[in-house]
Image: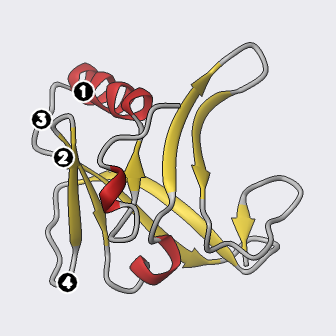
Amino acid sequence: MTVQNETLAQQGVILTTEAAAKVKSLLASEGRDDLALRIAVQPGGCSGLRYQLFFDERELEGDIVTSYDGVNVVTDRMSAPYLGGATIDFMDTIEQQGFTIDNPNAQSSCACGDSFH
């Protein structure tokens, strides 16, 4: 895992170079370059809060936007306190494939890794 812009760790979400490359690839396959990767926290899951990752074209008041290798990562102002310093990575191994979130603010998480408290 390679982390870019480590000084931004306390200000927002961190996107690794591997995750940024995967996001760029997904956007290219969709033929879109106008979307940002939005990460949000919503109530749900067995531990209380659930992550949501999705592409979004909206700009909401209070959004925190950070750019990594041309990929904009957006966090809404309500989710930001739960996600400051969280790292989004992309794994592609025989054991695991997909985006992962390492969140130093999570006090605990569920066994399936889908939600946190």
The first of marks 3 and 4 along the sequence is: 3
Q: Nearer the viewer, residue 97 or 83?
A: 83
- Judged left or right of residue 47, residue 100 is left
The first of marks 1 and 4 along the sequence is: 1
Q: Amino acid at mark 1?
A: Glu
At which x and y percent is residue 3?
Answer: 42, 40
Q: Amino acid at mark 4?
A: Gly
In the image, farthest residue toward the front? 7
Q: Which mark is residue 30?
A: 1
Quickly name the residue at label 4. Answer: 62
Q: Please tell me whether residue 87 is drawn above or below residue 108 in the rendered image.
A: above
Quick one: label 2, few (<14), some, or many (20+) residues within 10 Å? some
Verify CB contact (< 8 Å) between mark 2 and mark 1: yes
Q: Which quadrant would residue 75 be assigned to in this image?
A: bottom left
- For image coordinates 42% across by 38% down, the residue present is 16
Q: Which mark is residue 35?
A: 2
- Judged left or right of residue 113, residue 43 is left
Query: What kind of element bears circle 4?
Result: loop
Query: What kind of element bears circle 3?
Result: loop
Quickly name the residue at label 3. Answer: 33
State the separation of the CA atoms marked 3 and 4.
22 Å
Quick one: label 4, few (<14), some, or many (20+) residues within 10 Å? few
Q: Which quadrant of the rendered structure holds the C terminus?
A: bottom right
Kindly report which numbered mark, 4 or 2, lies closer to the viewer in this rendering.
4
